Amino acid sequence: MSRSDLASTTCSVARAIERVGDPWTLMILREMFLGSRRFDDLQRKTGASPHTLSQRLKQLCADEILVTRPYTTSPPRHEYFLTEKGLDLWPVIVMLRSWGEKWLEDGKSPAIGLTHKSCGGAMTPTLVCSTCGEPVGARDSRVHLSERMRLERNEHRGSSH
Amino acid sequence: MSRSDLASTTCSVARAIERVGDPWTLMILREMFLGSRRFDDLQRKTGASPHTLSQRLKQLCADEILVTRPYTTSPPRHEYFLTEKGLDLWPVIVMLRSWGEKWLEDGKSPAIGLTHKSCGGAMTPTLVCSTCGEPVGARDSRVHLSERMRLERNEHRGSSH
């Protein structure tokens, strides 16, 4: 299956994975949320090679997750910023962090702490049901697939054997 | 940067990315949350090659995200199940879904609907602050890096140029 196969799927999870479900892309997003803006800084803080970083940044801009803005004209240099679409990926990064803190902890204090600006409290972002407001996890939800999704999953690319 | 470099980082986001930040791994997790249990089914519904699927499943079991249980002994066959550690990845998949629904929508009805078992309501899982209960996004939080994390980010692998 190629990137384009995932992009054309009915499933919004698969489409999202096609855009951002790559280790380097996710590391770049982490860095953007930590405030990195420039190529050199992103390279040092993610450990990506210039080629890999350049390729991922180009794709993130093409997907309108990042946007560039010049910060000097001679020589021409630009910084990267998250768009609204990019900022909306914060919950994905934050939920990866929560899982890492819980299941991959190294016995030391958390590397990244969050404070809620408006209430001033230490924040552990928590997932709740939009209807009743109670915290929710995997066991609390029932899944319904659309007819289109059901057909697509069973007719998937290639044979099963 | 290799998988092992990310695994040894201070940052829980990076450690989580090292385990599950791969398109095939994320597609397998999606399928597990939709109820797939068997190799053939996972292969058909993710579109992965047998080699890729086998390699990812082996790693997910080694990482204790999945566990196998036999369902027949002659011939010996097993099914895959999410462990508690695996079930705790639900928020990551669900937040990818929310982002996909919002930003990559194809003008059709959602492929996957969720109902909250206990309240019976249609559920849009929502991220809230653990202190005040208000919905939170990227702009609502202030980030604090531990001293260890700050040092690590600036001393990252390789040179910056």
Image: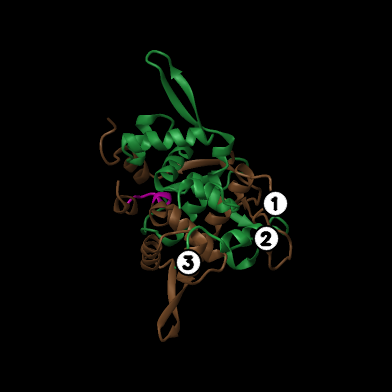
Chain colours: A brown, B green
Residue at 54% across / 38% down in the picture? Answer: B86
* Quadrant in which the C terminus of chain B appears: bottom left
Q: Which residue is mark 1?
A: A109
Q: Specify whether A8 is left or right of A114.
A: left
Q: Give the chain letter at badge 1.
A: A
Which is in the foreground here, disc 3 or disc 2? 3
Image coordinates for residue A71, horizontal then vertical, percent: 47, 82
Q: Give the chain letter at badge 3.
A: B
Q: Judge whether residue A12 is colored magenta.
A: yes
Callout 1: SS: loop
Dot placed on the residue nearer the N-terminal end, 3 or 2:
2
Q: Amino acid at mark 2?
A: Glu
Residue at 43% across / 47% down in the picture? Answer: B22
Q: Nearer the viewer, residue B156 or A118?
A: B156
Q: CA distance from mark 3 to mark 1?
A: 28 Å
Q: Judge whether residue B46 is colored magenta.
A: no
Q: Which residue is mark 3?
A: B160
* Above or below, comparing residue B45 to residue A85 in the picture: above
Same chain for mark 3 and mark 1? The answer is no
Q: Nearer the viewer, residue B39 or B144?
A: B144
Callout 2: SS: helix
Q: Which residues are magenta?
A: A9-14
Callout 3: SS: loop
Image coordinates for residue B89, horizontal then vertical, percent: 54, 44
Q: Amino acid at mark 3?
A: Ser
Q: Which residue is mark 2?
A: B147
Q: Amino acid at mark 1?
A: Ser
Q: Specify whether A37 is left or right of A130.
A: left
Q: CA distance from mark 3 to mark 2?
A: 21 Å
